Image (tube, helix red, strand yellow):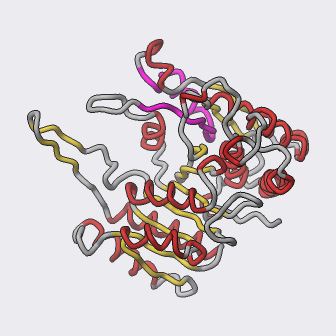
């Protein structure tokens, strides 16, 4: 099996012959369990390929608030700053006006991780709406409706500002074109420029102007409401999709369900000098401590980390091990129709490495 890179090669770290320092944040809920399973796989990969990586564990998430008064303590921020990247488990984020900003959003802003990369690919024996789905959704990670520019006006009104800048549009579109060029040479912009004429209009203008530099890539676009139905009807028609923050958040979860659910999906948050890798599922507090939740999403996030580091052979080995596990159908968690524990799945993947 050939691994398909999930990011443009131009965004790899420049120094390949080095000791990689990886911050590990297990998170809340089932986070420590899926992270523990992934760490077993990481050790297996290091032993097989002799990777020069050093991990250091830190605290972040809702469980830190009572002790530190924040979900991202200063000690953890210091750890992140002396690391090359972070492997992050799922974390619980409280809702409501005035509540803490999620740790993930804080880290994205701190390191300008502008590209959220979410692959959705048909996996062996995992139910998918159609066979052969293999797409990547790239979400602009710093602006849009998630810019955090919200204001209460008295008790009965609130305003949210949806910020879109030319610079942000240019770098995320270029990210998309570069990735599409290395895959199936098809890039789709998802927007709502017929209604959001100024903001999405700017995004669309930047996209098609940049398309002139990439004549070898098919460039097209779709409205967000139409795309939600096309992803169900013809998910195999897409390769790379680029869009703004809120739209990307919604359709990337939809795309995950198209190929069987969120338990097997990993994601990357990429900047020019730093990156964060995490599963796409949440902390699932009701399953805390039950050793029940599928760890494959966390493992696949780690696989993307190996790609970003330039360890393609190691990344291929992880994906191959996951595929063999799914193909056999012997060691699966409840969401895939099995009865195995989270820890058992992690050990099975590690043994195949």
Query: Magenta stretch?
Result: 70-93
**Relative to 115, 24 lies left or right:** right
Place residue 258 in its image quadrant.
bottom right
**Residue 261 in picture, x, y percent from top left:** 60, 53
Residue 58, compared with residue 17, is above or below; it is above
Q: Is residue 40 above or below residue 209?
A: above
Q: Is residue 75 magenta?
A: yes
Query: How many numbered callouts?
Result: 0
Q: Is residue 183 visible?
A: yes
Placement of 242 over or under 220, stated as above or below: above
- Determine the residue located farthest toward the top in the rendered image: 67
Name the residue at 73% across, 55% down.
Answer: 310
On-image quarter of the N terminus: bottom right
Q: Is residue 291 magenta?
A: no
**Is residue 73 positioned above or below 195 on the image?**
above
Residue 217 rendering spot, x and y as whole percentages: 55, 82
Which residue shows up at 55% across the image and 70% down it? 240
Does residue 274 appear anywhere in the picture? no
Residue that appears at 26% across and 65% down: 199
Which of these two is toward me, 168 or 45? 45
Place of residue 323 in the rendered image (x, y in percent of width and height, measured from the top left)? 80, 56
Identity of the residue furthest to the bottom in this view: 215
Point 65% across, 28% down: residue? 32
């Amino acid at each position: 099996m050939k691994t398909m890179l999930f990011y443009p090669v131009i965004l790899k770290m420049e120094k390949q012959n080095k000791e990689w320092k990886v911050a590990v944040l297990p998170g809340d809920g089932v986070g420590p369990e899926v992270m523990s399973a992934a760490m077993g796989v990481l050790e297996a990969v290091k032993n097989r390929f002799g990777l020069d990586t050093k991990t250091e564990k830190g605290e972040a998430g809702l469980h830190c608030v009572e002790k530190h008064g924040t979900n991202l303590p200063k000690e953890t921020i210091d750890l992140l700053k002396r690391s090359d990247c972070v492997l992050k488990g799922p974390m619980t984020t409280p809702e409501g006006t005035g509540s803490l900003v999620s740790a993930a959003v804080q880290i994205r802003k701190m390191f300008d991780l502008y590209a959220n990369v979410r692959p959705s690919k048909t996996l062996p024996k995992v139910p998918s709406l159609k066979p052969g789905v293999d797409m990547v959704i790239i979400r602009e990670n710093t602006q849009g409706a998630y810019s955090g520019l919200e204001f209460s006006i008295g008790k009965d009104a609130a305003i949210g500002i949806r910020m879109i800048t030319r610079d942000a549009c240019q770098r995320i579109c270029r990210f998309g074109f570069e990735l599409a060029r290395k895959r199936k040479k098809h890039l789709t912009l998802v927007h709502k420029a017929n209604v959001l004429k100024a903001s999405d209009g700017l995004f669309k203008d930047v996209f098609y102007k940049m398309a002139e530099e990439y004549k070898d890539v098919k460039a097209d676009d779709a409205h967000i409401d139409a795309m939600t139905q096309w992803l169900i009807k013809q998910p195999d028609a897409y390769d790379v999709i680029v869009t703004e923050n809120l739209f990307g958040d919604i359709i990337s979860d939809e795309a995950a369900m198209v190929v069987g659910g969120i338990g097997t999906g990993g994601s990357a948050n990429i900047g020019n000098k730093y990156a964060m890798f995490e599963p796409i599922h949440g902390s699932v507090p009701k399953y805390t401590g039950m050793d029940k939740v599928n760890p494959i999403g966390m493992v696949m996030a780690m696989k993307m980390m190996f790609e970003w580091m330039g360890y393609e052979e190691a990344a291929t080995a992880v994906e191959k091990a996951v595929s063999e596990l799914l193909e056999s159908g012997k060691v699966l968690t409840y969401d895939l129709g099995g009865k195995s524990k989270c820890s058992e799945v992690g050990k099975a993947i590690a043994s195949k490495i």
